[in-house]
Image (cartoon, grey):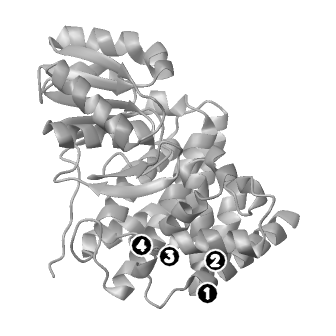
Amino acid sequence: MARIFISPSKYVQGPGELARIGEYVGAYGSRALVIISAGGLRRSGDEISASFSAAGVELTYDNFNGECSQAEIDRLVAVARDCGADVVVGVGGGKILDTAKAVANAADAPVVIVPTIAATDAPCSALSVVYTDEGQFKEYQFFKQNPNLVLMDTDVIAASPVRLTVSGMGDALATFFEARACLRSDATTCAGGHVTSAAMALARLCYETLMSDGLKARLALEAGACTESVEKVIEANTLLSGLGFESAGLAGAHAIHNGLTVLPETHAYYHGEKVAFGTLTQLVLENADELYEVLDFCVEVGLPVTFAQLGVEDASYERVLEVARLACAPADTLGNMPFEVTPEKVAAAMLAADAYGRAALAE
């Protein structure tokens, strides 16, 4: 099987770039469907509308209903066809962006992705995570191409709640370790081939950036400052993690995240917060040397390291085993680990990760 590397056609990151959205979108079409939340429209609608008007691009707004479900995707495909959209734009968080990608794919239209937070590595990828209407993980949907453009206005992202960027660090934290597992097992990646050296280099740079700049970025954001560390972490959370996970592969951390969605109390927590705990669990499974370095980083920046920090007060073996069984589903990515993984092994690793986390917090 060939080695395959995929990426968005263009990635733009910098302060004030949202004001140029009309110019960027106009390169792909003249009638845009803009998928956005009601809150996003209140915050950015005037700037977006003015930019589209100046660029001579017509636009139709439609409010996202809150869940990237098949029903919402189908509803918005019908809206795109009704308004004659020839380009789809997603403005907001990961679920809006995943929905926009799925809508554009179904409508056979280009897609422009405009994250307003740096909370996941979803923006750059040619896939969407689809949930049930109730918020439980359902499936990954893969598309024929990556987004045409990813536009990151760092002024907008720096103004978002700090917890969201920290959550993005949790998502990015998994990138190198899942990539390494896929390399060791010679797994097929999300890109449909084997790992390239380029993807591994990006995944490693993602991890190194978090270690060197993660805490500095969090402290700067808490002070309302968009520093070089903030810019580097936004790039790590979005571009480096996005390219790394997609072209180098997923393994334990994201499968454990998906398993955690079976516990309703975790639905109030962000994707990256659950992935961070999944990363710790994967490192326990591997008995990896980096376990304590990653544990210390999570505590330092404020990522969850225990079940209690994910809202789970009843972490009985039976409930944890239920999570582990879902994580080990044949269609998920725990099979990309370079050794046999069973639900019992995963449950034991989760309970151990929780114990290590409690010990670290008590220090």
Q: Is residue 48 above or below residue 233?
A: above
Give amino acid for label 3: Cys
- Residue 270 has which mark? none
The location of residue 17, given as percent across then percent down, is 33, 26
In the image, 215: left or right of 246? right
Please name which of the two marks, 3 or 2, marks the residue nearer to the observer. Answer: 3
| Marked residue nearer the N-terminal end (1 or 4) | 1
Question: How busy is the neighbourhood of tag 4: few (under 14 within 10 Å), some, or many (20 plus)?
Answer: many
Q: Identify the residue at image location x=56%, y=56%.
A: 170
Q: Nearer the viewer, mark 1 or mark 3?
A: 3
Q: Please determine whether, in this image, residue 175 is positioned above or below residue 291.
A: above
Q: Which mark is residue 333?
A: 4
Q: First in sequence, mark 1 or 3: give its number.
A: 1
> What quarter of the picture does the N terminus occupy?
bottom left
Give 50 or 335, whichever is nearer the viewer. Answer: 335
CA gap, disc 2 to disc 4?
20 Å
The residue type indicated by label 1 comes to: Asn
Query: In the figure, is residue 195 to the left or right of 270?
Result: left
Q: CA distance from mark 1 to mark 4?
A: 19 Å
- Badge 4 element: loop
Q: Contact (CB < 8 A) between labels 1 and 2? A: yes
Local packing at callout 2 (Cα closer than 10 Å; few below 14, some 14-19, many 20+) is some
- Looking at the rendered structure, the secondary structure element under dot 2 is helix
The numbered mark, 3 or 2, whose residue comes first in the sequence reads: 2
Q: Residue at x 70, y 66 (%)?
A: 296
Q: Locate residue 181 relative to residue 257 in the image: left or right.
A: left
Residue at the spot of label 1: 287
Dot 3 corresponds to which residue?
328
The spot of residue 191 in percent (x, y) is: 24, 65
